[in-house]
Image: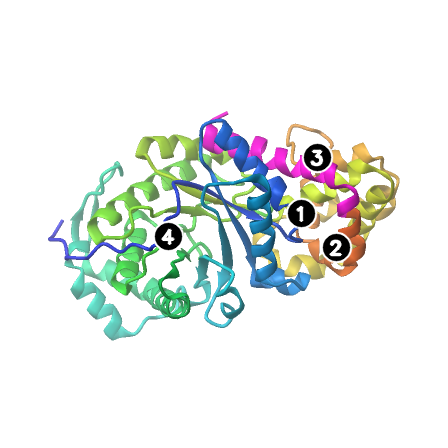
């Protein structure tokens, strides 16, 4: 491979630890239960720091503000005496939506999906390729088993696809930097919403472009093979995913050294909740490369709220049934924004009249993500995953019942996060 350009090392005053988990909390009631799961990990000998993530769309649907997410996180940290780092993520923001996140957040997931694939300025592509001659020729990346022969035309094609998105990320980053000043923040760039997984060469080009743009990213979310549907297990070729994940870790380590990116840079796995079948391959690759990871979860906590309500019986169970009935009645409207990340079989959705006759155990077994349970219904789970808008419309009625069922809800939230996510991925149990 040709010579290496001279890049200074970029660092943020805030550093994201090696292992972190994005914990969504739709209604800002489960921060203590979520943090309890991280405390259990610490007691088991592994630090997994929480990052409370909530997108602009979720805030808009629920009628909440990012300051509420920050307040809930701060209260939980104080109440439980958490002495390790923690963060609040402005999830999937762009230049038009970042404003209300600036003050309360210290982690920004910059989403440039709309710019991916849009042709970049010809001059920008030319300048980038000429400025990175090391990308052309025979390329060997330590940790990637195969070598690559790359010509200038290939690099131009990749740059043309991604350079506009990277430049947009730079614009958003500098806007945040101007507002946050020297207080520091974590920067993530989301590149997962594209048509196909990035090859090792493509990811290296993206990281070179990010370094060229001067963005000190600490996490990057690439596209992986397979489907990452909301709230259910991974669907795809496990062997291909395993190879991609391992290759991506190798590319990141290489780019950190080559381009001076932050040493804390790691992969971010979006829609990572409930992807049970990929946790073992992920852990194997992380051990092989000595790498960390940011696992992003979200609506799984909201589903544990529903499970806790149903388990509590009485009014809680009735409300859980009512929410299903409303979600079923408005399923097309609720599913439309998530069409690319859900896979619901309408024939597997029980009629509301049937669900109304269920016991608490029947409701919980259908919803709880235990794939080995014959009563588990992945279509019902996905519908309810995107159905949090129904609960949002219930307002105080929903929140009051959450309070009444706090013990059952908190137990489910903690056990789900620790037993099904943290233990298999970060503890290897």
Q: Which residue is mark 3?
A: 376
* Real-space CA distance between mark 2 and mark 4, rounded to the nearest whole angstrom: 36 Å
Circle 1 SS class: helix
Residue 302's label in the rendered image is: 1
- Dot placed on the residue nearer the N-terminal end, 2 or 4: 4
Q: Residue 408: x, y in percent?
A: 74, 36
Q: Which mark is residue 391?
A: 2
Point out the frontmost of discs 1 and 4: 4
- Badge 2 crowding class, 10 Å Cα cut-off, few under 14, some 14 to 19, many 20 or more, is many
Nearest the viewer among 271 and 311 is 311
- Start-end of magenta stretch: 402-429
For the point 29% across and 41% down, which residue is it? Answer: 250
**Residue 412 shown in magenta:** yes
Which comes sooner in the sequence, label 1 or label 2? 1
Mark 1–mark 2 CB contact (< 8 Å): yes
Closer mark to the observer between disc 2 and disc 4: 4
Residue under pointer 4: 14
Of circles 3 and 4, the one toward us is 4
Residue at the image position 48 percent from the left and 47 percent from the top: 86
From the viewer's side, name the closer residue of 207 and 343.
207
- Residues at marks 2 and 4 touching, judged by CB atoms closer than 8 Å: no
Query: Can residue 113 be seen?
Result: yes
Report the Cα–Cα distance between label 3 and label 2. Answer: 22 Å
- Place residue 189 in its image quadrant: bottom left
């Amino acid at each position: 491979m040709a010579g290496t350009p001279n890049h200074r090392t970029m660092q943020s005053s805030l550093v994201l630890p090696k292992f972190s988990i994005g914990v969504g909390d739709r209604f800002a009631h489960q921060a203590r239960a979520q943090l309890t799961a991280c405390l259990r990990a610490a007691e088991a000998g592994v630090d997994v720091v929480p990052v409370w993530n909530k997108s602009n769309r979720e805030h808009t649907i629920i009628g909440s503000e990012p300051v509420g997410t920050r307040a809930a996180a701060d209260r939980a940290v104080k109440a439980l005496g958490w002495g390790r780092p923690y963060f609040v993520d402005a999830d999937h923001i762009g230049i038009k939506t970042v404003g209300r996140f600036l003050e309360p957040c210290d982690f920004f997931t910059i989403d440039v999906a709309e710019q991916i694939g849009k042709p970049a300025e010809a001059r920008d592509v030319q300048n980038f390729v000429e400025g990175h001659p090391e990308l052309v020729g025979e390329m060997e990346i330590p940790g990637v088993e195969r070598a690559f022969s790359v010509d200038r035309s290939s690099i131009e094609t990749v740059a043309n696809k991604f350079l506009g998105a990277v430049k947009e990320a730079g614009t958003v980053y500098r806007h945040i930097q101007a507002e946050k000043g020297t207080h520091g923040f974590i920067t993530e760039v989301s590149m997962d919403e594209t048509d196909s997984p990035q090859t090792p060469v493509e990811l290296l080009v993206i990281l070179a472009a990010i370094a060229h743009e001067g963005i000190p990213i600490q996490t990057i979310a690439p596209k992986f093979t397979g489907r990452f549907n909301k709230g259910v297990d991974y669907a795809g070729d496990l062997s291909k995913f395993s190879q991609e994940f391992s290759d991506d870790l190798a590319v990141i380590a290489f780019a950190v050294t080559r381009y001076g990116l932050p040493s804390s840079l790691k992969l971010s796995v979006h829609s990572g909740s409930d992807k049970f079948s990929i946790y073992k391959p992920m852990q194997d690759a992380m051990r092989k490369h000595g790498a960390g990871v940011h696992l992003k979860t979200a609506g799984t906590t909201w589903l544990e709220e529903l499970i806790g309500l149903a388990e509590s019986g009485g009014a809680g169970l009735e409300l859980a049934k009512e929410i299903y009935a409303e979600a079923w009645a408005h399923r097309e409207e609720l599913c439309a924004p998530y069409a690319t990340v859900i896979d619901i079989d309408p024939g597997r959705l029980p009629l509301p009249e049937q669900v109304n006759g269920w016991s608490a155990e029947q409701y919980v077994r259908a919803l709880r993500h235990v794939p080995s349970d014959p009563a588990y219904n992945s279509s019902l789970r996905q519908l309810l995953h995107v159905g949090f808008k129904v609960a949002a419309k219930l307002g105080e009625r929903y929140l009051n019942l959450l309070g009444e069922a706090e013990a059952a809800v908190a137990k489910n939230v903690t056990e789900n996060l620790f037993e099904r996510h943290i233990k298999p991925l970060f503890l290897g149990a």
